[in-house]
Every structure is written in C-alpha cells, then in structure tokens.
Amino acid sequence: MVNAAKPTSRPLSPHLQVYRLPLAAVLSITHRITGMGLSLGLLLLTWWLTSAAYGPDTYDMALGYIASPLGMLVLLGFSVALFFHLCNGIRHLFWDAGRNFEISQTKRGNIYVIIGTIVLTAAAWLLALA
Amino acid sequence: MLAANNLRSPLGRARGLGSAKEGLHHWWAQRLTALALVPLAVWFVAGIVHLATGGEPYEAFMAWIANPCNATLMILFLGVAFHHAQLGMQVVYEDYISCQSWRTAAIVLTKFAAYGFAALGIVSTLICCFGG
Ligand code: HEM
C-alpha cells in the first residue's frame, strides 16, 4: 500500500511552472527564432536590391525607410540575429562533426556565442557609424 | 502514434518511417549552405558597413555592386541564403505543423517564394551591374 508519509525519492518530471530553462536551451530556441527572422530579412534584402534596380528615385525612397527609426531598429535586429545565428551555427557545425559534446564545453560555448554576438554587433555598428 | 509504433517489428518500423529517404540529402545541404554562409555573411556585413560610410547613397551602391567580385558574391549570397532559409523553414514546419496537408502546403509555398525572391534579387543585381 502507499505510505503517505514517505517522501517521494523517485525522479519527478520538470514542473512546468517552476522549471528554469537552461541557458543552452534558451540559445537553442534562439537559433531557430533568429533563423526564421533572418528568412524574413532576406525578403527585405531583395526589396532593397530591387529598389536600386528600379533607379535612383526608388532607391532613395527605400533608403528613407531604412534610415527611419523603425528601419534602424529592424536593421539592428537583423544584425544581432545574423551574428548570433552565425556564431551558434558554427557551434552547430562542430557538433555535427562530433565534437564539443561535454557539458563543460557546452557551457563554455554558450559564453563564446553570447560574447561573439555582442562583440561582432558592436564592432559592425561602430564601424558603420564612424 | 508512439503506442502504435511500439507494437511494430523493427522491420515494420523501418518500412514505415525508418529509412533516411530524402533526409540525408536535406541534412547535408543544410550543413553545406551553412558552411558557405560563414564567409558570405562576413563579406555581406563588411559591404553594408562600407556602404553606410561612403558618399552619395545611390552612386556608392551602384559603384560597389558594379565590382565583379561584389556582384558575384551578392548573387552567391542570395542563392545560398535563400536555399538555406527554405531548407531550415521546412524543418520548422515539420516540427510544428502536424496536419499533413497544411504542412505540405507551407513547405511548397515557402520553396516557391524562396526561389522566386532569390531570382528577383539576382536579376536586380545583374540590372544594377549592366545598367538597366
Ligand atoms: C541570412 C542568412 C541565414 C538564414 C536566413 C538562416 C535561416 C535558418 C533557418 C530558418 C534555420 C532552421 C532553424 C531550425 O531548424 O531550428 C537555420 C538552421 C541552421 N543555420 Fe541558418 N540561416 C542563415 C545563416 C546561417 C549562417 C551564417 C550559419 C553559419 C554557420 C548558419 C547555420 C545554420 C545551421 C548549422 C542550422 C541547423 C541548425 C539545427 O540543426 O538545428 N545559418 N538557418
């Protein structure tokens, strides 16, 4: 019979409301979200190239949108997404080659990806605005 | 689904879902495009940074894209990135859209859109180079 007083020592599945997502899991879903965002960003890239092909007037109009506050915000988002996806994608390629599966390596990789994203984004914007 | 699978022999399961079929090619193409995108993405960012810092926007862009290396890399970037994006979105749909017909519709629409927009971007690049 069940002994109600005995504490349960069997493993419990994660409790949905008190479960803290590990950093590696956050970065994993972020790779997917940035991939989807970048896919939409490619449509904007095409729109920009097409505006140039139509001539100076349409190109200036497109640049007007890009230089607006909202346009700059989109560009910032695109650049962060690209650098994160690039850094984490390189990590994916190492995993695909069968390397870096130890937990310690994964934890170090998390940090490299985050620092890489910040540094590359900052460098690109500093150079572009300089 | 899982319960039904458990009652199947390993051979039955392999016949139903098990073999890689198109999967290996898809997987390999996703990695190959990812690898190619590493240098292409770096070149792309460098190009945007260059354009943001240089002169009259339209003239600066036309001069930049008229450079044969830049035009070639832009065309490669468009082709490879749209291919990679379309392969990646297919995996996302396969994970989240359980209804077969909606899933297939989403995949087919995305493929058509990806190749259509890639063509538009490549043609636009060529027009800029050769003076439309
Ligand atoms: C504009 C450029 C890019 C776009 C639009 C894009 C888009 C995507 C999408 C939609 C996915 C699917 C996400 C998923 O299944 O969770 C994906 C996956 C992936 N991307 Fe990209 N990506 C781009 C650039 C790159 C770059 C530069 C790399 C560098 C290595 C890269 C590496 C990868 C890898 C390795 C995967 C597979 C991840 C997995 O197996 O879960 N991507 N990408």
Image: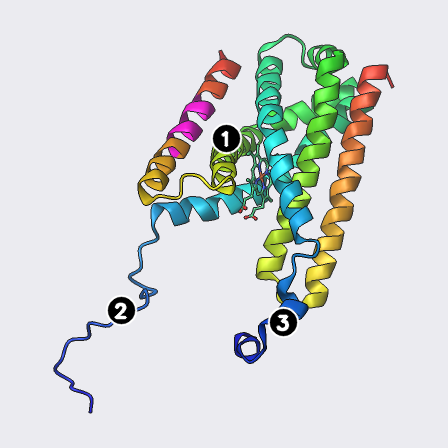
Magenta segment: does it hold A120?
yes
- The extreme left residue here reads A5
Depth check, front residue: B64 or B7: B7
- Where is residue A48 drawn, in percent x and y? 70, 28
**Residue drawn at (35%, 45%) of the image:** A23
Magenta residue check for B63:
no
Mark number displayed over residue A123: none
The quarter in which the C terminus of chain B is drawn is top right
Foreground residue among B53 and B42: B42
Q: Residue at x 85, y 16 (%)?
A: B130
On screen, residue B17 above or below B116: below
Query: Picture quarter containing residue A19?
Result: bottom left
| Residue linked to disc 3 | B11
Q: Secondary structure at mark 1?
A: helix
| Distance between the alpha carbons at the discs numbered 1 and 3 | 44 Å
The magenta segment is: A114-122
